[in-house]
Image (cartoon, helix red, strand yellow):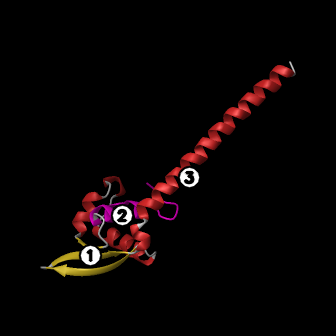
Amino acid sequence: MISDTLSKREDAVMNAVYTLSAGRERFLAAPYDLLALLPPKLKFDEEKLERVLGDLGLDGYFELILSDRKGEKVYVLHLTARGMGYRRQDAQRRRSVYFRWGVAAVGAVITALIGLLIKIVFR
């Protein structure tokens, strides 16, 4: 699920954040919780995760606060309206892509049929 405005890494992190939120606006997330939800092929480590989280925070998807809980690093995340609407935006983008593919396929079929008709007529 790649968004038009997010890179593959950002999209993966946003999916993980949204999954951990479970519909809540504010929640705590440990780095290992987020890393466990990310695809292994993207080869995330804690430093890369923190950098991408910071970028998403700057883009307005959530407010990010780094904190400690009993000596363990945790992220306090507060999803904004843009962050809460992430899934809806992604679903709309998918529908748009499928519609474009459909129009392209129909156009290709019509073009092929017209080509065949022209070939038959001028034979």
Instruction: Give the alpha-carbon distance from disc 2 to disc 3, as whole Å.
Output: 23 Å
Q: Is residue 2 magenta?
A: yes
Q: Where in the figure is residue 120, as x and y percent of width and height?
A: 81, 20
How packed mark 2 is, by other alpha carbons closer than 10 Å (few <14, some 14-19, many 20 or more), is: many
* Badge 3 amino acid: Ser
Q: What number is the disc on residue 96?
A: 3
**Outermost residue, top side:** 123
Q: What number is the disc on residue 13?
A: 2
The secondary element bearing badge 2 is classed as helix
Choose the circle earlier in sequence order: 1 or 2. Answer: 2
Q: Where in the figure is residue 91, as x and y percent of width and height?
A: 46, 55
Q: Residue at x 44, y 60 (%)?
A: 88
Q: Nearer the viewer, residue 75 or 95?
A: 95
Q: Residue at x 87, y 22 (%)?
A: 122
Choose the circle earlier in sequence order: 3 or 1. Answer: 1
Residue where numbered disc 1 is placed: 75
* Badge 2 amino acid: Val
How packed mark 1 is, by other alpha carbons closer than 10 Å (few <14, some 14-19, many 20 or more), is: many
Quarter of the image holding residue 67? Answer: bottom left
- In the image, residue 16 above or below residue 112: below
Q: Where in the figure is residue 29, as x and y percent of width and height?
A: 24, 70
Labels in figure, total: 3
In the rendered structure, the answer to whether residue 121 lies left or right of residue 33 reads right
Q: Residue at x 56, y 52 (%)?
A: 96
Looking at the rendered image, the quarter that the N terminus falls into is: bottom left
Q: Chief secondary structure of the magenta span?
A: helix
Q: Nearer the viewer, residue 7 or 119?
A: 119
Read off the magenta span: 1-21
